[in-house]
Amino acid sequence: MKKFLCTFFLCMLTAATLAVSAHAGEDVIKAGLYFGSSALYSANLQNYEGSGYALGWFDESTREFMEAGYLEEEKISVTASGTIYLSGGSYTSARPGKADGVIGGYHVQLEEAFPSFEEAAYAAAQLPDAFPAFINNQYRVRMGAFSSREEAETAAASYGTQVWRDRYGMDRIVSGGAVQPSATGVVVTVTGTTEILFAFDCSGAKSLGILPDGGGGKAQTWFKGYRWYGGFEYRRSTGGNINVINVLDIDDYVKGVLPYEMSPVWPLEALKAQAVCARTYALLPSKHYDSYRFDVCNTIDCQVYQGVNHASALTDQAVEETAGIVARYGGKYAETYYCSANGGASESSENVWSNPLPYLVGKEDPYEALTDIPDYNYTIRYSYSQLSQRLRDKGYSVGTVNAAYVSKTTPTGNVAAVTFRDTAGKSVTLTKEACRWTLDTKSMRFTINGGGSGAASWAVNPSGGTISSIGDAWAVSSGDLMGLLGSGEVYAISSSGTSALKQPTASSGSGDGITITGTGWGHGVGMSQYGAKAMAEQGYTYEDILLFYYTGIVLDGI
């Protein structure tokens, strides 16, 4: 039985109930769930908290939800328009061996445009296989779902004998013609059936939005095995499959990030620090917006967001006690990058990527050593043949590698460059994060043993900092005069007399490969999550944690 009729009072009540998730501003986030190559042909929704769904669209500039109509169903599906096959309870565009049902791609559309969803739904309730639709900004009524235009035209002729009565008591004779949805249309059905509840097609200018009704509370909705707050946008602006976007309040979004980016049983202050990082990161200019019209994706390419299945009272508390708090530098949102563990020292952004940011400055991290970190130390071994192939797979022109060594480190002791040399004497040097991606190391903090060098370095302090040329060093006299040592022999004076410095002999390597040993996990820029855990265990607040890892930031409201 169709359940799309609602009274004017019920519609107004629904709009008021959902207003908390439908206001404009930076506190409304669009999170891409399925898009691009992962876009869906059909997407199902099922109420978890609350019941029913408001239909409409999200205003492109204000993000306000514009309601067009309402459905009382508990389970609905949104599917790309066209011929749709039902098989095993799922919808598909490919004809299966045995279909449980078919939704044809042609319909009969009444000539009349209606002033509201309610009036279109009222008319549809009186006609066979009819449903309301929103087509190019007009409320219409469509009938049937036919496999061909000819079938639709035949049906339109037969419908001409049908009479329906409008809301003012006037009898109307059915008059309409065959139509076919455009490449951007979608249909809403009762999940697992061929019953169409609603059709939406604005030729890509608008995208269908669905806002679950919380029934006076905060709605939660099942989608793909996860529970989500907020509403959903179904973008099919250029045809093809449907990009599914979750539209919701920023703090509800953070509640779906926190238990996936940090253990939900960690200390509250660490969770609060992570909440501020996640909130700020989501508000940064989006690399996805121009292509997909959302702010942040739901994978590690942005930050993991999978709804609230694993949210706990503690993670929700962390979000609520930092509600609206973000990190800024110079009045702008800070790029609050974070990693699992930096290995003992964080790193400046320009030493890993490209742009120097004054609040992402590398520093020794004394806190990670104060907590237990699983898999903190790691070892990787490569034969020279594996290294040669790996470099070629990454696009580097190199022969058979017979030497590999760390050729440059940063002031905090992380890797800045790795050089490879082949049997022909040709060298290839990787810098910054290319070292980590190419060698598949867990962090930027590692050493290479057994790989030879060919250009031995000079130690300048007990912590292991090196320079490749002694001529790059500076000498300081008792009169504070400074100068480069330059070329020529360099002498050291000790209690036993004066002696010339000798450069170490380069190692020829050992065996047929290298051994990499390292600590940490991730790029090392910004906050260490395990470092935050350790600081919280030592009694530090979330403000202390953030101000340590992000130099000079200010914490305030959105």
Image (cartoon, helix red, strand yellow):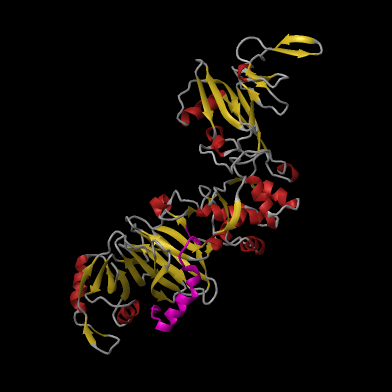
In the image shown, does 464 or 33 lie closer to the viewer?
464
Tell me residue 500's x, y (percent): 70, 10
Furthest-bottom residue in this view? 169
Left or right for 468, reference 434: right
Q: Quadrant of residue 367?
A: top right
The image position of residue 159, as x and y in percent, is 21, 78
- Please say if 530 is above or below 198: above
Nearer the observer, 39 or 28: 28
Seen as rendered, the residue at the extreme right is 495
In this rendering, would 450 be left or right of 95?
right
Residue 474 in the image, given as x and y percentages of width and height: 65, 20
Q: For this rendering, which residue is in front, 223 or 503?
A: 503
- Residue 39 visible (yes or no): yes
Q: Is residue 330 above or below residue 160?
A: above
* Residue 96, image quadrant: bottom left
Q: Reply above or below: 503 against 41.
A: above
Quarter holding the C terminus?
A: bottom right
At 64% from the left and 20% from the top, the residue drawn is 473
Q: Residue furthest front?
A: 479
**Which region shows up in magenta?**
1-30
**Image quarter (top left, top right, bottom left or bottom right) of the N terminus:** bottom left
Identify the residue at horizontal 43%, vertical 67% (top origin). Answer: 64
